[in-house]
Image (cartoon, rainbow, N blue to C red):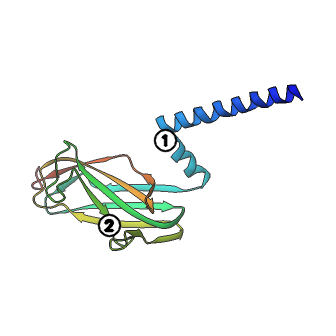
Amino acid sequence: MLSLTIGGQQLLQTLALIVGIILVVHGIWPAFFVELDMKVRRTDFRANVAGRKVRLGQPIFLKAKFNGALRDGYFTAQITNMKGEILPTTKLTYEWLPYNDTYDINTKRGLLRGSGPFKCDWSWRIPLNYMIGEYEVMIAVYDGDRRIRATKPIPFKVVRGSHD
């Protein structure tokens, strides 16, 4: 009986060590666990931006596809100025652009429910008072308040005219 207790303690210590390592790795490298979660649940996410140069007053075209299960899902994009400057439209360093056909702004809830594939193409007109320069957009799919997947930041340039 004594050896079982000692063996049980060793087992508990080993399990505690493994859990500790997982928690440390999760804190340092959370993207690994998101990717692992996606593979386990057999989901797929793809998104892109059409063109890398957008004129003031012209739309930027966004595209996203998610294959998986959602309860309150929606697509969104976040635009930031690469210099970290405040944007004139939001007075923040970013612009949040939910795809309105997938997000109810009044209830602040996503409208995608069930199993996908879910696809969307949407655009947003670059305001005339935006600064000329380098920007980036990150496209994501959310389920409630939880971000499921997101692209790496995709760079694009805001220019004055067609010859910039």
In this rendering, would 7 be left or right of 94?
right
Residue depth check, mark 2 versus mark 1: number of the one nearer the observer: 1
The label number, if any, that marks residue 30 in the structure image: 1
Quarter placement of the N terminus: top right
Judging from the image, what secondary structure is the residue with disc 2 in?
A: strand
In this rendering, the answer to whether 31 lies above or below 74 is: above
Judging from the image, what secondary structure is the residue with disc 1 in?
A: helix
Contact between labelled residues 1 and 2, with CB atoms less than 8 Å apart: no
> Residue 73's x, y, as percent?
45, 65
Identify which amino acid the numbered label 1 is placed on: Pro
Q: Which of the two residues, 91 or 132, is positioned nearer the viewer here?
A: 91
The label number, if any, that marks residue 71 in the structure image: none
Q: Residue furthest right?
A: 1
Q: Quadrant of residue 141?
A: bottom left
The label number, if any, that marks residue 122 in the structure image: 2
> Residue 116's x, y, as percent?
53, 67
In this rendering, would 120 be left or right of 79?
right
How packed is label 2: few (under 14 Cα within 10 Å), some, or many (20 or more)?
A: some
Identify which amino acid the numbered label 2 is placed on: Trp
In this rendering, the answer to whether 115 lies above or below 130 is: below
> Residue 50's x, y, as percent?
30, 57
Q: CA distance from mark 2 to mark 1?
A: 29 Å
Write the residue at 41% across / 69% down. 109
Q: Which of the two residues, 99 or 64, is positioned nearer the viewer here?
A: 99
Q: Quadrant of residue 74?
A: bottom left
